[in-house]
Amino acid sequence: MKPSIVLVVGTFLAVLQASAVPYIQVLGVAPDLILIFAASWAVVRGYDEGFWVIPILGFTRDFISSDPVGTSALALAPIVLLAAVVRLRAMDSEFVPTAIVVAAGTLLYGIISIAILRATGQDTPVTDGALVVLPAIIVNAVFTPIVYFPVHWLGSRTTMRILGPGRISMPL
């Protein structure tokens, strides 16, 4: 897909994340649609596209939220590496790797964003962060199908790819 479409979808998700999603509380946290979209995109379309999509989504989120600009782009960056790692294992479906990337990405996002906020002088107790990050891992993994299936339907590559050492697989 073109970067302009990703920018439009990212802006829509960022506005939705800032306006409506906070009212959807599960285990005391709201799902992170931008993180789920970034992970789904990086797994479905490949980490090479995730490499440029994730900064677009991160900066879009930062411009709409109150976080320092660049915080989300840095905190979402490990998703590219995670998507590359799950590509090493051949699986019949891309959903399970996406859920794994969402869960691990949520943990890393929480750790990195708390570290950045603390480094910029904002008061963010680490214990409060742990009380938010741990339930967020579960909530984001549960909400993954809501974002994954449209991304998979719209953006799945139809070419065969080599996954792992010498295995050729067709995407779901």
Image: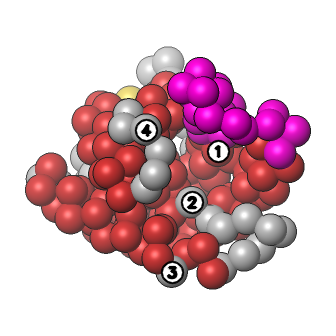
| Residue beneath the point at 46% across and 52% down | 66
Image: 169 above or below 63 = above
Rendered location of residue 42, percent (x, y): 40, 43
Left or right of 5: which side holds 114? right
For the question of whether residue 82 can be seen, the reply is no
Q: Indicate the secondary structure of the residue bearing disc 2.
A: loop
Which residues are drawn in magenta?
108-128
Q: Mark 4 or mark 1, which is nearer the start of the sequence?
A: 4
Residue at the disc numbered 1: 106
72 or 67, nearer to the observer:
67
For the question of whether residue 10 can be seen, the reply is yes
167 or 120, nearer to the observer:
120
Q: Indicate the secondary structure of the residue bearing disc 1.
A: helix
The secondary structure that most of the magenta stretch takes on is helix
Rendered location of residue 33, percent (x, y): 50, 63
- Asked whether the beta carbons under mark 1 and mark 4 sit within 8 Å of each other, the answer is no
